[in-house]
Amino acid sequence: SHTAQREFANLQGLLDIVQSRGNLASTVIPVLSILIERMNSEHSCASVRAAIRKRLVDTLEVYKQNEFLVLATCLDPRFKINFLDATSKELLHAKVLEILDESTEDTNEKPVEEEEDDPFHRPVQGDEPASVAG
């Protein structure tokens, strides 16, 4: 039917976005969420939709366990945390705090480098070696 063709054309368009070269990791969770929503709202090909939807839900759950994909999605200003359930939001919050803690520890543990070893150190006038006149 025409409705089924339109439905699968929309599905193909979203799948092309996910599979395109150069696609950002942050789009995976939102696109799967949209596909699942569409599978719930369409009324044609119920058995096919149910099978596709089940596979999408299973795949989405696997991807939601990947903290890097979740973090990438949340840091992308197009999506933020709109595609996460309450549990995922709590896990994300804990992960961000853990990362911040680790970065603070790393900063505090680094020894202070000597000025000569610092590539950003600019010698103060008078510290520079005398230039050789040519």
Image (spheres, rainbow, N blue to C red):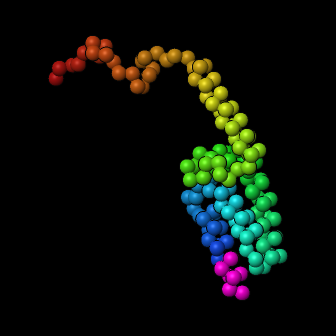
x 65%, y 67%: residue = 15
- Indicate whether 59 appears above or below 48: above
Viewer-side residue, 116 vs 60: 60
At 81% from the left edge and 71% from the top edge, which residue is drawn? Answer: 50
Q: How many marks?
A: 0
Q: Position of residue 3 (x, y in %)?
A: 69, 82
**Residue 102 at what x, y percent from top left?**
65, 28
Front position in the image: 127 or 86: 86
Front-lying residue, 28 or 116: 28
Residue 23 position, x and y percent, is: 58, 58
For the view shown, which residue lies furthest in the bottom direction? Answer: 1
Q: Quadrant of residue 61?
A: bottom right
Q: What quarter of the picture does the N terminus occupy?
A: bottom right
- The x and y percentages for residue 6 are 65, 80
Residue 125 magenta-highlighted: no
Is residue 86 among what the camera can see? Answer: yes
At 60% from the left edge and 65% from the top edge, which residue is drawn?
17
- Of the 4 image quadrants, the one containing the C terminus is top left
Please identify the dominant SS of the magenta region.
helix
Identify which residue is drawn at 55% across, 49% down. Answer: 77
Magenta residues (range): 1-8
Is residue 3 found inside the magenta-colored segment of the image? Answer: yes
Can I make out residue 72 in this image? Answer: no
Image quadrant in which you'd find residue 56: bottom right
| Viewer-proximal residue among 121 and 7 | 7
Instruction: Using the rendered view, name the quadrant where residue 60 is placed.
Output: bottom right
- Left or right, 89 with respect to 55, comes to left
